[in-house]
Image (cartoon, rainbow, N blue to C red):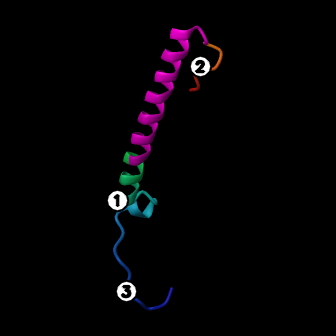
Amino acid sequence: MGGGQRKKLSRAERQNNGPHRNLDRQGAADRKAELVRKMRERAGAAEGTGQAGDSTAQS
């Protein structure tokens, strides 16, 4: 590294868990919740019509 000034990094940022990561986690949680909701709707629709073949649960 040259003689330039560097921003002081917090412990979380040194571990690559900076403030941006919290936003990423929230976005990922939102996407997962939406996906789970869609899967449950499909599973409910499949059970209602008697087509339970495509509604395999993935964990």
Q: Is residue 38 magenta?
A: yes
Q: Residue 57 occupies which quadrant of the picture?
A: top right
- Magenta region: 27-51
Residue appearing at x 41%, y 52% in the figure? 24
Residue position marked by numbered label 3 in the rendering: 5
Mark 3: amino acid? Gln
Answer with mark 1 or mark 2, whichever residue precedes in sequence.
Answer: 1
Magenta stretch: helix, strand or loop mostly: helix
Contact? badges 3 and 1 (CB < 8 Å): no
In the image, 7 versus 51, the foreground residue is: 51
32 vs 41: above or below: below
Q: Label 2 is placed on what type of residue?
A: Ser
**Disc on the earlier residue, 2 or 3:** 3
Instruction: Rate crowding at label 3 as few (under 14), some (14 to 19) or many (20 or more) other CA atoms within 10 Å.
Output: few
Residue 14 point in image, percent of width and height? 43, 64
Q: Which residue is under mark 1?
A: 19
Q: CA distance from mark 1 to mark 2?
A: 37 Å
Under tag 2, what secondary structure? loop
- Give above or below for 9 relative to 34: below
Q: Residue at x 48, y 15 (%)?
A: 44
| Relative height, residue 6 to residue 42 (above, below) | below
- For image coordinates 41% across by 40% down, the residue present is 29
Tell me the CA gap for discs 3 and 1.
21 Å
Crowding at dot 1, Cα within 10 Å, few <14 / some 14-19 / many 20+, comes out as few
Q: Quadrant of residue 50?
A: top right
Of labels 2 and 3, the one closer to you: 2
Q: CA distance from mark 2 to mark 3?
A: 56 Å
What kind of residue is marked 1?
Answer: Pro
Q: Position of residue 42 (x, y in %)?
A: 51, 22
Q: Can you tell which mark lies on residue 27? A: none
Q: Residues within 10 Å of mark 2 (few under 14, many from 20)?
A: some
Secondary element under disc 1, as helix, strand or loop, is: helix
